[in-house]
Amino acid sequence: MSETGGLNKIYGLAYQCPFNNRLSECPFYTFEGKSFREKVFIIKKMDFQQKQDILTKHEDCWNKLHEYDKKQVAICFDPSISVHKIILTN
């Protein structure tokens, strides 16, 4: 990860999960309820390896969701409840 590119991505992930529904194993799950300013303060105190670990965990989660797609599972956004739903397409 380049320092700048990784930082931009990590702050974006801290702000909001791209899937709008953090899993309990997400490193940012414990950040829920904190202001973005508090999240930035915590991230600034992390060393490079801690940030890299978070980005690796995010990539693993992303890949796991793509594995569902390969098994004919659709992920759709339900705006009425602001979350993604997983729907079996078989």
Image (cartoon, rainbow, N blue to C red):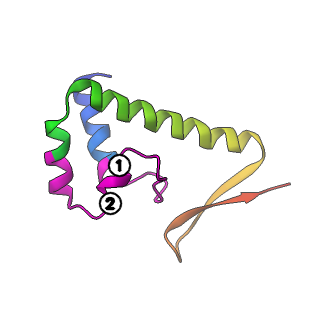
Density class for disc 1 (Cα within 10 Å; few <14, some 14-19, many ≥20) is some
Judge from the rendering whether residue 18 lies leftward or rightward of residue 7; answer left or right. right
Residue identified by numbered label 1: 28
Point 52% across, 34% down: residue: 60
Please tell me whether residue 43 is drawn above or below residue 1 in the rendered image: below
The C terminus sits in image quarter: bottom right
Prevailing secondary structure of the magenta residues: loop
User: What residue is at 49 percent from the left and 53 percent from the top?
Assistant: 23
Q: Is residue 14 left or right of residue 65?
A: left
Q: Amino acid at mark 2?
A: Glu
Tell me where residue 31 appears, x and y as whole percent: 29, 54
The question of residue 36 being in magenta is answered with yes
89 part of magenta stretch: no
**How far apart are the alpha carbons under marks 2 and 1?**
7 Å
Outermost residue to the right: 90
Please report the residue visible at 33 percent of the width from the left and 27 percent of the height from the top.
Answer: 52
Q: Which mark is residue 32?
A: 2
Q: Position of residue 28 (x, y in %)?
A: 35, 49
Q: Which mark is residue 82?
A: none
**Label 2 crowd bin: few (<14), some (14–19), many (20+), radius 10 Å:** few
Q: How many marks?
A: 2
- Expressed as whole percent of the image width and height from the top left, the position of residue 84 reads 56, 61
Q: Residue at x 30, y 49 (%)?
A: 14
User: In the figure, is residue 39 to the left or right of 66?
Assistant: left
Q: Could you tell me which secondary element the residue under label 2 belongs to?
A: loop
Q: Amino acid at mark 1?
A: Phe
Question: From which residue to which does the magenta span run?
Answer: 14-41
Q: Residue furthest bottom?
A: 80
Quadrant that contains the N terminus: top left
Q: Are marks 2 and 1 in contact (CB under 8 Å)?
A: yes
Q: Is residue 25 above or below residue 82?
A: above
Mark 1 secondary-structure assignment: loop
